[in-house]
Image (cartoon, rainbow, N blue to C red):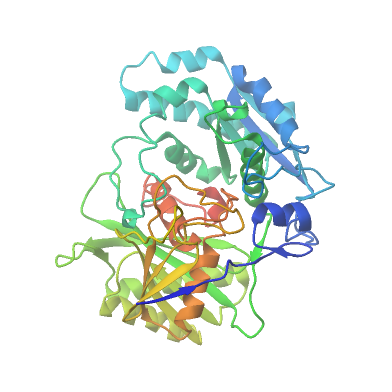
Amino acid sequence: MRNSYIEEPTLQFGKGVHICPRAGIGEHEVFDLDSNTRKATINVGLVCSNNSLTAAREWFEKCSSFIKAKTSKQPKLFPSFCGFNEHVGFRSRMVADEQLTKGISNTAIDDLFNERDRTTIISNAIDVFYGEIYELVQTKRPEVVVCVIPRIFEERVLKQQEHLPDEALEEGLEEEVELDFRRALKAKSMGLGVPLQLIKESNLRPNPRSQDDATKAWNFCTAIYYKANGIPWRLIRREDRLPTCYVGVAFYRSRDKESLHTSLAQMFDELGRGVILRGMPVMIDKDDRKPHLRETQAHQLLTDALEKYWQVMKNYPSRLVLHKTSSYTDNELEGFRQAVREKKIGAADYVTILDSPLRLFRDGLYPPVRGTCVDLGDRRYFICTRGSVPYYETYPGQYVPQPIEVRIFQNDESPEVITAEILALTKMNWNNTQFDGKYPITVGCARKVGQILKYLPESAPYQTRYSFYM
């Protein structure tokens, strides 16, 4: 085994570069600062209970101004929030006035809990919120709709649904015990064409059990900006490297729990622009009990994804990197390679990214540094995407982190470049501005997309922008 270290990837912002999204926006402003398409004013729809209306408006007002950081021994991990306004950082402002607000009466919320069956309560709650979102979108057309989840929902609707942390990839095949409010509401509202941002009522006020206000504001406002088609930051691509497109392929189980699985792909360029594609049903392999594509399915899936990419980007990439959450069969590889040849893509890398049951340790109290890479031989690597972060001067986690395992099945680029890109893609998460994410956006997002697509009938239209799933 041979150890190496991958330098913390740098991100490009409007007026400079930085390794940290928060410091980058605060010091150098958003990447698309000079773009003609960016919005200097973002109209934000608000759907909430009448009880939380005042707190929601106070939260928007607080986010518009500087928020002082909490007292901490790690000031870089918990920096002050620059404010969401036209003068600094995002160089944009949110408008959420009365015309963009829909309040849900206390009576309507109380009526939901007259039912005893939990699934019925959740289904009716989804209908209540969807009705208000529908009316708001049809009449006012906001760029984003913020839904404030009432406090009573947190105990009786959400409590048992947040059982699967992002720290478990599990190939996206987790069982879902019952109807999930967040996922089902986003799926049902998808046809309205406006992304949703959900926030708990308890997070609108200072809460010792939750994040500090500055951190919440960084995450909330970055997500709003991205969902309004903004580009907060981008990856840096060296001029001597080919323009690259990153594809994630994963699998998810249908809600009826039948043996069929559906594949999905998503594609991201250095700007973080994504194209979501729902694939076709697949079968579980009888030998390794993992989902795999037939050769024709692999060819069709990647062909469809590349054509959708062309529709958005108006060109094909010069290089393709495909991340998959299970190993490649010979039939899958041949199907993917055929699609690449037909589109005349010059270089391609086929990579599997897996959870690893192993842990890496080092002398002292802290885990290995984020970016530690262990070469296991035979083109297999462990990468510590979570770990001690020198910039933060600490390990920002509670438990010993798991590395991810990377297997390179076929490659045109060097393993050093492929592993460095994986670490860089962990920083393309616009829901969390703490930059030490475990998974690259390709497979991390693939799992989240599958969790929502399972609530859409096979024939139902779906959105191709990632902002509808995050």
- The x, y position of residue 400, in whole percent, is 39, 51
Q: Which residue is the extreme one toward the front?
A: 364
Is residue 361 rendered to the left or right of residue 39? left
Between 428 and 47, the residue placed more toward the observer is: 428
Residue 67 visible? The answer is: yes
- The x, y position of residue 437, in whole percent, is 50, 55
The mark total stands at 0
In this view, 112 is above or below 28: above
Q: Tell me the residue at 66%/36% (across/down).
A: 70
- The x, y position of residue 192, in whole percent, is 56, 43
Q: Which residue is the extreme one toward the left?
A: 287
In this view, 283 is above or below 221: below
Is residue 286 rendered to the left or right of residue 157? left
Between 445 and 379, the residue placed more toward the observer is: 379
Tell me which corner region of the image, top left, top right, bottom left or bottom right, holds residue 304: bottom left
Q: Tell me the residue at 44%/51% (across/down).
A: 448
- The x, y position of residue 82, in whole percent, is 76, 44
Tell me which corner region of the image, top left, top right, bottom left or bottom right, holds residue 179: top left
Q: Tell me the residue at 56%/59% (across/down).
A: 427
Residue 307 visible? The answer is: no
Is residue 310 rendered to the left or right of residue 448? right
The quadrant of the rendering that contains the N terminus is bottom left
